[in-house]
Image (cartoon, grey):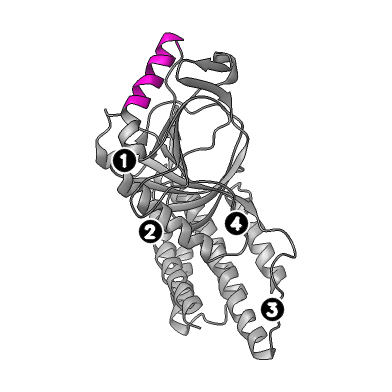
Amino acid sequence: MLKTHALCIAALALTGSLSTMALAQEARRVGGDLFATSTQDNGVYRSGSAIVRESLPEGYPAPTPPGAIEIKSYPSVRRAEVSGSGNPQRGSGMAFFSLFSHIQERDIAMTSPVETDLRAWSSVDGSADGWTMSFLYRNAELGPLGDDGRITVRDTEPVTVVSIGLQGAYGEQTFRRGLAVLNAWLEAQDEWTPDGDPRSLSYNGPSIPDARKWAEIQIPVRPVAAGSSKPIVRDGAAQDAERVARTNENAAEIIQIAITRGVPLFNNGHPEACAAIYEVAARCVLAINPMRLTTHGRQSLNDALDTVSTSQNASEVAWALRSALDEVFNLLSQTAQHP
């Protein structure tokens, strides 16, 4: 069974010229909206109606699509920063204009996002022991390190974070919403542990309407050390339950990869490539034969596969396969929660 799963992942990779489950080398989708996508064209990022027009620092990972949760690694970046205390909402306006004046005086182009780090942030009253707002240099050659009045220019340490993409107006309510989702995700898994204070990334200026603004809320994380978790002794019934869950998870992973890679191909005018990926996924799910796949779910996949030979319309085939894959994915998700 594990061999079948591995071969199916490899087949998907070859069909779509992919790697494995990673959406990019620097980001791994781990929760939230598993099928959210973004595009990048001439430096402009889009996800739905959300948009980022400003350049990112060199080596900076792409924005996480709204609704998605990702593990991302950031390189060291040079940034100009202003720090304060108390509620960041009260001091952010002055800090922003101080930073804007700094880059104007040094003839440094504006980049995106604006990073805001919060130290010991309180979910009760929105206060913090301290905060730091930062403008990012596109690269380290644009200006020297050191102090410039209230502003400090320094190079950050590389960091790994768990991040959720958000869309809508910036402010404390958005920060609370994102942080609550991330904390819940951290509580529900045992691979990563928090390793620092939260931060927000704001990608848009005032020219972008609130409804289209793109942000991320992030918590620095580190892998849980091997052997730090207490071993769990499972009886035979528990092992049987684990085998059931594992086949469901393998099938769900294949569907997830297929849709994540197929949607951009379809949207960019390549329905035949999208359909090919969906076909491989459907056949792999049937080969794995997850123990909770119902007769109706299996029939839906077979009916959709019939369109591969009976229809000459690639879009029709892609949609038929996608509908069946969605049905099976939802089924597997429900049975994972209710064994």
Would you place residue 178 above or below residue 199 in this image? below
Q: Which mark is residue 232?
A: 3
- What is the CA distance from the residue labelled 1 to the residue labelled 4? 27 Å
Chain-order first, disc 2 or disc 3: 3
- What is the CA distance from the residue labelled 3 to the residue labelled 4? 19 Å
Under mark 4, the amino acid is: Thr
Which residue is rendered at x = 47% and y = 51% of the image?
Answer: 272
Q: Quadrant of residue 76?
A: top right
Q: Secondary structure at mark 4?
A: strand
Chain-order first, disc 3 or disc 4: 4
Judge whether residue 95 is colored magenta: yes
Under mark 2, the amino acid is: Glu
Q: Is residue 283 visible?
A: yes
Single out the mark in the foreground, 1 or 2.
1
Left or right for 300, reference 74: left
Residue 1 % position (x, y): 69, 74
Q: Which mark is residue 263?
A: none
- What is the CA distance from the residue labelled 1 to the residue labelled 3? 43 Å
Which residue is rendered at x = 47% and y = 58% of the image?
Answer: 183
Left or right for 160, reference 319: right
Label 2, on which residue? 316
